[in-house]
């Protein structure tokens, strides 16, 4: 089966996420900015970066910015948008489940709404290899909400191909798998949007492995 993410036009994805009733694009970009302000890393990788949501808010002090996504059209769009504006930008088309990630380890990995679509042990093994010792992994997971669709209905019908691939991951399960791959959880907090959807942000530090 083709991964549905390869078939969803970026304009559909971004328009869906920006709808006022969904409002997730802003929340995910805010999460990236908060992580950069908290850890002030020299090097950061945004895992499942789509077209570069939040890249416009990355400070110039971040020496190396890596964007990774499975969809080559998304990476091409990120390159067009930010290639000339972010010095030290590296963009990679890669499946985080397929093998070691094609970039040198970074201090901070930001993986927002991507663990819902992958095998946790495989992805975490590759992300651990891509994280410097003592570096951090910040994840954002969508939490289950009774009465709400996992993928909100919208005019962008292509997004409705995602549910068969999507699995809402309990934060405890992510923490347990991350621990097995050398990460220690340092913090966890919940963000609730007006839509009623809630999201867990977890902060992990690579302490071994
Ligand atoms: C729900 S979106 C989140 C996008 C982004 N974090 C944001 O702020 O909008 C999930 C993203 O992960 C990417 N993705 C899904 N599976 C992937 C995989 N196995 N490897 C790399 N990227 C993947 C998708 O193409 C998509 O861009």
Image (spheres, rainbow, N blue to C red):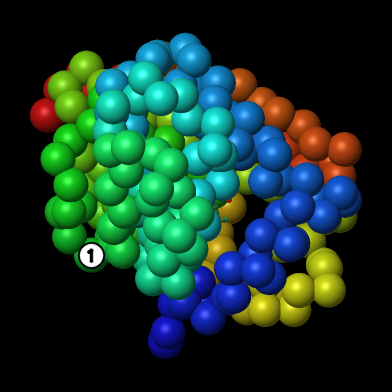
Rendered location of residue 176, percent (x, y): 36, 34
Residue drawn 17% across the image and 53% down it: 102
Rendered location of residue 43, percent (x, y): 28, 28
In depth, the one of 167 and 204 nearer the eye is: 204
Residue drawn 50% across the image and 40% down it: 55
Task: Find residue 88 and report its image quarter.
Answer: top left
Q: How many marks?
A: 1
Residue drawn 32% across the image and 37% down it: 87
Image quadrant where one finds the N terminus: bottom left
In depth, the one of 138 and 40 nearer the eye is: 40
Q: Residue furthest bottom?
A: 1
Q: Is residue 86 left or right of residue 94?
A: right
- For the question of whether residue 178 can be seen, the reply is no
Q: Is residue 109 above or below residue 160?
A: above
Residue drawn 45% across the image and 72% down it: 73
Q: Is residue 129 above or below residue 7?
A: above
In depth, the one of 137 and 44 nearer the eye is: 44
Image quadrant where one finds the C terminus: top left
In depth, the one of 136 and 61 nearer the eye is: 61
Q: Is residue 154 above or below residue 131?
A: below
Quick check: is the Cβ at mark 1 less than 8 Å away from ligand 1? yes
Q: Is residue 93 left or right of residue 147?
A: left
Reading the image, the residue beneath label 1 is: 98
Q: Secondary structure at mark 1?
A: loop
Rendered location of residue 173, percent (x, y): 44, 40
Rendered location of residue 146, percent (x, y): 81, 50
Q: Is residue 177 left or right of residue 188?
A: left
- For the question of whether residue 105 can be seen, the reply is yes
């Amino acid at each position: 089966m083709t991964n549905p993410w390869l078939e969803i036009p970026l304009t559909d994805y971004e328009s869906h996420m920006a709808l006022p009733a969904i409002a997730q694009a802003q929340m995910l970009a805010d999460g990236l900015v908060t992580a950069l302000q908290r850890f002030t890393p020299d090097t950061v990788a945004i895992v499942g970066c789509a077209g570069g949501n939040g890249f416009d808010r990355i400070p110039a002090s971040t020496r190396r910015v890596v964007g990774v996504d499975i969809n080559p059209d998304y990476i091409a769009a990120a390159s067009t948008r930010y290639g000339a504006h972010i010095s030290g930008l590296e963009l990679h088309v890669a499946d985080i489940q397929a093998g070691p990630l094609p970039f040198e380890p970074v201090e901070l990995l930001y993986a927002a709404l991507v663990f819902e679509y992958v095998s946790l042990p495989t992805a975490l093994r590759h992300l651990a290899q891509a994280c410097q010792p003592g570096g951090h992994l910040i994840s954002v997971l969508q939490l289950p909400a009774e009465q709400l669709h996992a993928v909100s209905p919208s005019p962008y019908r292509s997004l409705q191909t995602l549910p068969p691939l999507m699995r809402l991951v309990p934060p405890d399960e992510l923490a347990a798998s991350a621990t097995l791959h050398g990460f220690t959880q340092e913090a966890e907090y919940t963000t609730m949007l007006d839509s009623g959807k809630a999201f867990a942000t977890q902060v992990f530090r690579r302490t071994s492995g």
